[in-house]
Image (cartoon, helix red, strand yellow):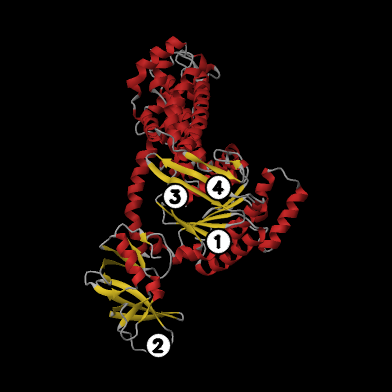
Amino acid sequence: MSLHRQPILIPAIVIGIYMIYACGPLLWLVLSSLKDRQELFSWPPSLFFTPDLSGYRMVFGIGEAAETATALGLTDALINSVVISVSGTVLAVAFGTLAGYACSRFAFPGRDDFMFFALSTRMIPPVAVLVFYHVMFSRLGLSDTRTGLILVVTFINLGLATWIMKGFFDGVPEEIENIALVNGYTRLYAFWNLVLPMVRGGIAATAGFCFIFAWNEFAFSTILATTQAKTLPVKISSATGATGIEWAQICAAGVVLVIPVAIFFWLIRKYLLMGMTFGVLGRSRT
Amino acid sequence: MARVALDHLSVRFGTVAAVDDISIAFEQGEFIVLLGPSGCGKTTTLRCIAGLEQPTSGQIFFDQDEVSHLPPRVRQVAMVFQFVSLYPHLRVRDNIAFPLRARGEGRAEIERKIAWMTKIFDLGDILHRRPGTLPPGARQKAALARAVVREPRVLLLDEPLSAIDEQFREEMRWELRHLQKELGMTTVHVTHDQREAMSLADRVVLMRAGKIVQAGTPRELFDDPVDEFAAHFIGSPSVNLIDAAFTEDGVALGEAGVPIRLPERHLEALRRSGLRRGRIGIRPHSLTPASQGDHAAVPVERPIAYSVGRERFLDFELSGQVWRGVLPADAGISLPERMHLDPARIFYFTPEGVRLPVA
């Protein structure tokens, strides 16, 4: 009994410390979002108090709290974020799936170079290309538009989506299509009806990653979305107004920002590891 | 059923020629086995016939029709693959119906054909099961049924038996052979197992490095190999080979120069070649205990005798190499001191491995 217990103790302590380190800020964020000014700055921070929802009211512009000068009114930004992230994710996953399939199945000239290029798009620090984007977008009339940011988000995710999806397609034996092909079906039929259902998990994982990157995207949005198309992270970062910092409001906005990511992670938790390993785990090629 | 002709077929991947300018025709109803070591181009050739691979150059004909660049779905071929042959999410009967549905055949017609296949392949017990729950042998049987049900012009088999365990494989071979004859299907079967090739084929096509080494009946390949590779690849236990010096009255084997006297017509052939050295080969079954005063015999050193079933073999050392011969089943425990080479069965090769004809 004790023999069995002992080795677990040290990992438990290590994990416990890590959990406090990882979850502490999150807990602080949630609690603070529900506190009023007084409560917020009391030390030590109180765990039990009467919740005050004025932070959330200000965030969503509900009731009298919205009338105050410092109220952010994040509803627009939230809609922008949702539209941009979801559209960008759908596009990146759709194109990434097609590109990943092509790279997995066809040995076209320059395939390896293409794959490296696709990956390299993720290695570029956004700052390096920001100016170029700024100029290009203003010429094309894409500055400060959702369309423009959807394109950016699609671009930054496409390479990753291609790589992850290629990994998943590699895990599907080629015979799956070959059987259909020699039995009188088209490749499109085989791809759509046989191969795609087999990589559903991969698509979920890819979509999860793409959505999270899109949702958290900050650098491009700050520069390219100045007013109309402002996304949630950009809006929150600009919450330090002239009349001081509305901490409760910022914390409430932070919670709003975290929730979709948390939900998404929870939904795709099964596929996360597969996605991180480019589909290598869980399936082996026969 | 069609006659299949390959005309100067080549497939190149980059600079590598997987299939290198091969021309051969498979007659209607013939059971062809493409045999060779891995990477010899046999599977690529098969995939070309199926349409899963595009030839770099050359043509493929089914009867009069050129199909070289047609997509697989219009070629009316059927193929059985090595590992994944059935769709795991479909029951056996739906797997069999799969190619029929592609052609939009009616329900009654499909039912009739499934019943026909069930009878031929004895699938009654497994028709409603999913492939995952079946042993590999039953799976390949169902895969074969799916291939045959569409009455293809050519049946293509890509090592369909290699994933099946030894015992059941022999039964499957027998069954495959019967079916093929019964239905008169032009069949192209790929394998690296020479025993499988010998037991199935009307004609074996031995390949190496993208080229056809030799095509012929199993008997021809065994008795009359065109070169050292063919001699070595076919036959088990495999052929005994050794370097030899061609002398006035015979050959001297190995570094030890063990002399063998040869009949005059062999000597003439060797003289005609103008070679001083080469290699000789002899199959174990043509290497038997020598009688007194035999001049076509080699000494037996460090012998080990053993039986495989009713066959008795004798392994011994000859000039640093292990040679294998056979012993009569009724021989006593005393081992022969010399083994006799049947001169009519000796293969002569140039140092490059090309067979020297002895007419």
Q: Marks 1 and 2, Cα distance to the nearest angstrom?
A: 36 Å
- Left or right of A12 in this view: B246: left
- In the rendered structure, which disc, 1 or 3, sits on the residue that comes first in sequence? 3
Q: Nearer the viewer, mark 3 or mark 2?
A: 2
- Say what amino acid the circle numbered 4 marks: Ala
- In the rendered structure, which disc, 3 or 2, sits on the residue that comes first in sequence? 3
Instruction: Say few, some or many: other residues with alpha carbon within 10 Å of mark 4 (under 14 / 14 to 19 / 20 or more).
Output: many
Let me know if marks 1 and 3 both belong to one chain.
yes
- In the rendered structure, which disc, 1 or 2, sits on the residue that comes first in sequence? 1
Chain under disc 1:
B
Number of numbered markers:
4
Tell me whether circle 3 and circle 4 mark residues in contact (CB < 8 Å): no
Instruction: Please provide percent x and percent y for residue A31.
Output: 44, 32
Chain under disc 4:
B
Let me know if marks 3 and 4 both belong to one chain.
yes
- Left or right of A200 in this view: B37: left
Which element is circle 1 on?
loop
Which residue matches tag 1?
B202
Let me know if marks 3 and 2 both belong to one chain.
yes
Q: Is residue A49 visible?
A: no
Instruction: Please provide percent x and percent y for residue A82.
Output: 52, 25
Chain under disc 3:
B
Which residue matches tag 4?
B5
Tell me whether circle 4 and circle 2 mark residues in contact (CB < 8 Å): no
Which residue matches tag 2?
B331
Measuring 45% from the left and 42% from the top, which residue is drawn there? B11
Let me know if marks 4 and 2 both belong to one chain.
yes
Which residue matches tag 3?
B41
